[in-house]
Image: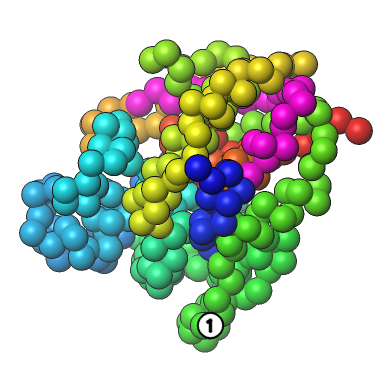
Amino acid sequence: MNTLAQELTAFRIAKYEVVIRTGEQGLVLPPYKGSTLRGGFGRVFRRVACAQRQGECKECVLKETCPYAYIFETSPPEGSQVLRNLENISRPFVLEPPLETKTEYAPGEELAFGLALFGKAVRYLPYFIICFEELGRVGIGKGRKPYQLARISALDVEDTATEIYNARDRIVKNIDIVIAGEKVWERAQAQYLGRNEISIRLLTVTRLKHDNHFVRSLPFHVLIRGLLRRISSLSYFHHERELRVDYKGLIERAEQVTTVKENTRWVDWARYSHRQDGRVNLGGLMGEVTYRGNNLDEFLPLLALGELIHVGKGAVFGMGRYEIGFTK
């Protein structure tokens, strides 16, 4: 059985900053913009990439080769016996809306959001760029006002940006900046190794289940369980690699980590779902939790990777985003 650090070295992440520029009408967006971006983007992606454009992906004969089916309707490979009981297979991307709650953007104003692609999804970046452009023509937010895709930059593990696309020439530069799991681990070691206290700051609504209920506080083991579920799914379905770690032992040791201080609150939030034809409640926790334990180093690879991939429900539109801190 390998250690977490060894198992996660094969993980691959591509991070991007996407900048859009509002048109002559400006934009009116909700305080939390993740659902708006994800909803509009998904509809455009299907129109661009789907050959059939009708029915459900699981019934389509082209589902094994269709970019839309892979990105948005990920299903287990034929004959797969691993992780088949997951309620939802993790999608191989995350949209990170800006954390600001501003709702009105003036004509010509710029708005930046993040995009992360995992494993095999990295090869589909051109589809994402085409769809961001098309979504700008279709329009988003109240009144579906148009925007222009201004530029996209690739980010390395230190968040250093390299421009790969701009509206002037509309050429995608062939710059391969993919973050390997081992680089994430190396950075985490330099910042946090050897500490017996660590803080987790929940930047967006974080929705985690334990014992079939959404938690109203965040014990360390619940966070670790959520990360293990998500990383296992992303590894198996998008890296073609089963995560081989001591799940039972990790969870038992996570239960020994205590909560020193918790300053979280439940935030109610709902989004409109076209699939369910109604509003869906997606409330969850925000705030900060400080943990103490003698074995925190063991969990650093999980926690560091979680900063990039998020945790819990709704990760694709930016929920479950957090950052690690520590007590000086």
Q: Position of residue 179 (x, y in %)?
A: 59, 63
Identify the residue under disc 1. 173
Question: Furthest-front residue in view?
Answer: 1
| Residue name at image x 23 percent, y 41 percent | 81
Lateral position of residue 236 relative to residue 104, left or right: left
Any part of residue 132 in sight: no
| Residue name at image x 29 percent, y 41 percent | 82
Q: Position of residue 116 (x, y in %)?
A: 51, 56
Q: Position of residue 64 (x, y in %)?
A: 19, 60
Count of numbered badges drawn on the protein: 1
Q: Which one is in front, 297 or 33?
A: 297
Question: Furthest-right residue in view?
Answer: 328
Any part of residue 58 in sight: yes
Q: Where is residue 219, by image quadrant? A: top right
Lateral position of residue 293 relative to residue 183, left or right: right
Q: Position of residue 47 (x, y in %)?
A: 23, 61
Q: Where is residue 213, by image quadrant? A: top left
Q: Is residue 217 above or below residue 156?
A: above
Q: Is residue 226 magenta?
A: no
Q: Is residue 299 magenta?
A: yes
Q: Is residue 217 above or below residue 251?
A: above
Q: Which one is in front, 277 or 77?
A: 77
Q: Is residue 200 above or below residue 119?
A: above
Q: Secondary structure at mark 1?
A: loop
Q: Quadrant of the C terminus?
A: top right
Magenta stretch bounds: 280-301
Lateral position of residue 205 relative to residue 64, left or right: right
Instruction: Report the amino acid beneath label 1.
Output: Lys
Q: Is residue 266 above or below residue 199?
A: above
| Residue name at image x 56 percent, y 29 percent | 250
